[in-house]
Image (spheres, rainbow, N blue to C red):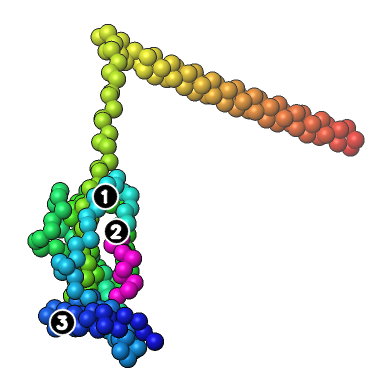
Amino acid sequence: MCRHRGMNRQLIHHMNYAADAFPGLLYQRVMNCTSCQYGLFTCLSAKPPLDCGEHHLEADEGEEVVLDCFLSWHTLVVGQTEYHYSWHPGETNVLFDGEYEELVVTKESKIVLNQLSVSEEGSYRCLLKDQKGTALSRTFFQLEVKPFPSTSPRQVVTLPSLPLGYENTPYSLQKSSFLTVLILLTVLSITGSLIIIEYLRKSLKRQEEARGRDSRTAGDIELNTE
């Protein structure tokens, strides 16, 4: 058996009045202590939509940041709800009123911004809405992205200039030495080739003379035999 029946009747009567005056607000499941049956009633917010604070976030360029506007009472909301994330770029302070560019609508309370760039900093807003489109909570995030530190140009070390006429001397000496060696190798190659040719020519000549003498000797022996 339900207790404090009279007080609960007054509470339910007050909530019914709130539902008639402000339709589409937060729903709550309440027991009617007269019939001991549960029913859905709207819960009046003191300042709809409910502002749930602002958060200032800082991140380095190239990193990631997580935006999460979940509150514990969100699980008590009856019916389908969605989180609407929107963005106002380039804003250095939280912008409570103004035009926001919609980013994503999701049933998850958090989103992840990957590979941040400086152009993505600004004011972000998260709205929890019911199936009628009524905002039940509103959370703001002010994101500041720190750019990569600029790298200073390396100092180029300049060597002192060489005296006039001395700059190309090592290269000239190296080039002339290379040409001299090349000429000597060419001369030696030609000389060696000539010597080998002359040696072969004389060897062939001696072989021919020896064959001639052998043929004459053979002819003389045949004549004597006859």
Q: Residue at x 26, y 30 (%)?
A: 153
Dots 2 and 1: beta carbons under 8 Å? yes
Looking at the rendered image, the quarter that the C terminus falls into is top right
Q: Which residue is mark 2?
A: 67
Left or right position of 121 against 74: left
The kind of secondary structure element at disc 2 is: strand
Using the image, tell me which numbered label, if any, was put on residue 154: none
In the picture as drawn, the residue positioned furthest to the left comes out as 98
| Quarter location, residue 225 | top right
Viewer-nearest of labels 1 and 3?
A: 3
In the picture as drawn, the residue positioned furthest to the right comes out as 225
Give the x, y percent position of residue 46.
16, 68
The kind of secondary structure element at disc 1 is: strand
Give the x, y percent position of residue 86.
19, 64
Q: Residue at x 34, y 12 (%)?
A: 169
| Quarter location, residue 149 | top left
- Tag 3: amino acid: Tyr
Give the x, y percent position of residue 224.
88, 32
Dots 3 and 2: beta carbons under 8 Å? no
Up-down relation of residue 225 to residue 143 (above or below): above
Q: Which residue is mark 1?
A: 57
Sequence-earlier tag: 1 or 3:
3
Q: Residue at x 19, y 70 (%)?
A: 45
Relative depth, front residue between 144 and 117: 144
Left or right position of 203 against 225: left
Q: Which residue is mark 3?
A: 17
In the picture as drawn, the residue positioned furthest to the top comes out as 163
- Tag 1: amino acid: Leu
The residue range painted magenta reads 68-77
Viewer-nearest of labels 3 and 2?
A: 3
Q: Is residue 74 magenta?
A: yes
